[in-house]
Image (tube, rainbow, N blue to C red):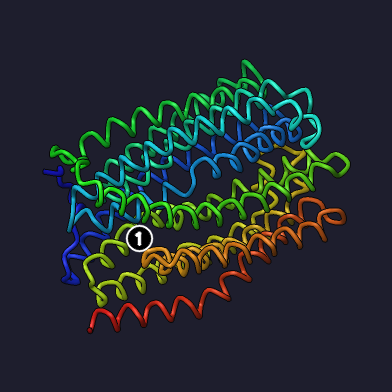
Amino acid sequence: MVPQSPVAEITPPATSLGRILALGAFWTLFGAVVSRGLTLVGSVVAGRILGSSGFGEVAMIQSTQGLFGVLAGAGLGLAATKFVAEFRSVDPLRASRCVALATSIAVASGAMVAAIMCVFAEPVAANVLNMPHLVTELRVATLLVFFGTINGVQTGAVVGYGDFRIAAILNCVRGAGLCFLLIAGIQFGGVLGGVIALVVTEAVAVLANHAALQRLLPRQPSAWHDRATAWRDLKGMFRFSGFSLAGSVCTMAALWFSNVMLVAQPDGYAALGIFNAADRWRQVLLFVPASFSPLILSLLSNLHGNNDAGAYRRLFGVNLWINAAVVIVPSAGLALLATPAMRLFGVEYCDGRMTLVILATSAIAVVMNNILGQILISQGAVLGRFLLDVLLSATLALVSWWLIPHYRDQGMAIGSLAAYAATALVLIAPAIYFMKRRAANSDA
């Protein structure tokens, strides 16, 4: 049997749903506060040690590996959460088979993409990123792709099983490793030391996730002899992860394009360092919504699998109001305190005050995009979500291309605000449609 956590299964009554949501929210928030807090501390110290240019170099390396990491991950982390959550109650063996399939694909694709990046690191560093002196750092960072791909699938599976206490502990382990290892690595090894610290953090996270999954997976064999069922699961995961991958690649490519546009400007790496520092504060605003997002997706997917439209609507409504409460007022407060917030990174970051104001405003649009998009993902409408990701990516790339040459980091921030706001507005209609369809199917 699968070990049961307090939030492992969902039952229809509203009281049960409320208890599950409260317990899941507590552990999710606990893990997020510790992890994001430690990450922010590490980022502030790293930014002060390296200065804006060095901090911008680390950000560019992460962005580059993040783009190819999305390609290697192939949307498998999101697929693991959706399929495990949907089947864990009605078909535990099928859920475990999905974990095994996703992990196997992640190991193979992560290794392949990391090897390709290692081979082409020199021309990418010299001709694309305009930093030929960081070839070694870029090659070392290819391991972020490998470990990050596996980590994404493992984390998605843990969340899918609904054990948010374990997920919180794993989040804290990763946050602590990132904070202390990043500071130590940069202090003793500069940019290269920071990159090595990031790689080691991901490797430790993979080991911790593996140990956690061994407790959650069922003890029975996964029925691999049933080839027809295994092939059906594989096709379903490939369809879901394929559209997720395409949407993620579009989004990451647009973000990477914006970064490349910015560093191509005079003193561009310093500008990217300022944007990266401001974005760290935006991530603080988003830490509660972003942390709750896997919890909500897991619960919505499980309710969808159990065909419980009433609980599905209640959960969506609660999620909407909670997110509105935790992001609007803090965003306004951070905008008012933008100057001292940026000064924490160092005096040279104070010019990024307006960049932070714009990014703080964009946090509201990011949250609405995520909330409405969860309806499509939980019901398997990944094609619709992909088309909206294309809209987001195109808006971000076009606005950044237009504004960055004139407004530098502020232009990049405006691009982010415009992209997420446009997508959130367009998402309203399909979200309403799928909610109504969910209710009609349940009544039938």
Instruction: Provide residue 360's location: percent of width, then percent of height.
Output: 62, 59
Residue receiving disc 1 = 296
User: For the view shown, which residue lies furthest in the top direction?
Assistant: 188
Q: Is residue 408 left or right of residue 313?
A: right
Q: Is residue 405 above or below residue 394?
A: above
- Compared with residue 297, is residue 255 higher up or lower down, i.e. above or below? above
203, 222: nearer the viewer: 222
Look at 64% across and 17% down and name the residue there. 189
Name the secondary structure under disc 1: helix
Q: Position of residue 324 (x, y in %)?
A: 47, 69
Dot 1 amino acid type: Ile
Q: Residue furthest front?
A: 228
Which of the 4 image quarters holds residue 423? Answer: bottom right
User: What residue is shown at x 58% (from left), y 27% (from top)?
Assistant: 115
Q: How many marks?
A: 1
Q: Position of residue 140 (x, y in %)?
A: 60, 23
Q: Which residue is nearer to you in this view: 162 or 91?
A: 91
Question: Residue 36 or 392: which is nearer the viewer?
Answer: 392
